[in-house]
Amino acid sequence: MSDISSMKPIKDVVFRDIDIRFEPHPVTRQLLIKKNAEAVKQAVKNLVLTNRYEKLFRPDIYGGVTELLFENVDEATLILLRQQIEDVITYHEPRAKLEKVNVREDFDRNGFIVDVIFSIRNVKEPFTVSAFFERIR
């Protein structure tokens, strides 16, 4: 029988991911690890930037951003982009609790500015991941 006092408290949970740059530590030569907030931020950004069919056998996991970059910059495209980002984070990143997605057009640079605001389980303050998306010809 397990004792309740010996159980690990939820606040000690550590989220870890390998740094996407795959750079080795200068001394140990092991891959760098991102922890907690930085790991979840990296995961959110990767989900948003994932294209359809990039994840083998999981075509439902994609951000849909690159598909919408070549659409006309109007209110309908902004709503669709916001919905795609909300869906992929809500359904595929359980560590992040999505609070808001802001999508704005930038006519001067011909692209979209996206701010994803989310909180992480067991952390009070919200985090923001911002990105600028533009077409590459």
Image: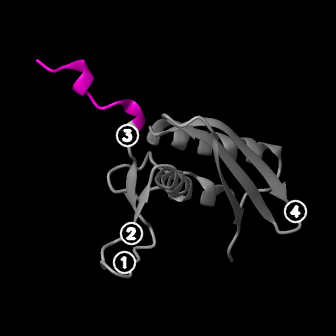
| Residue 31 sits above or below residue 7 on the image | below
Residue 119 falls inside the magenta stretch = no
* Viewer-closest of 27 and 46: 27
Distance between the alpha carbons at the discs numbered 1 and 3? 25 Å
Q: What span is colored magenta in the figure?
A: 1-11
Determine whether label 1 and label 2 are within 8 Å by CB: yes
| Residue carrying label 2 | 32
Callout 1 amino acid: Pro
Q: Is residue 33 left or right of residue 2?
A: right
Looking at the image, which residue sits at the far right?
108
Tell me how far mark 4 sits from mark 3, CA to CA: 43 Å
Packing grade of label 1 (10 A; few <14, some 14-19, many >=20) is few
Q: Earlier in the sequence, mark 4 or mark 1?
A: 1
* Callout in the foreground (4, 3): 3
Q: Earlier in the sequence, mark 1 or mark 2?
A: 1
Q: Are marks 4 and 3 in contact (CB under 8 Å)?
A: no
Image quadrant for the N terminus?
Answer: top left
Which residue is tagged 1?
A: 24
Q: Is residue 69 visible?
A: no
Q: CA distance from mark 2 to mark 4?
A: 38 Å
Which label sits on residue 107? 4
Q: Is residue 5 magenta?
A: yes
Q: Given the image, on which type of amino acid does mark 3 rest? A: Val
Q: Residue at x 49, y 50 (%)?
A: 40
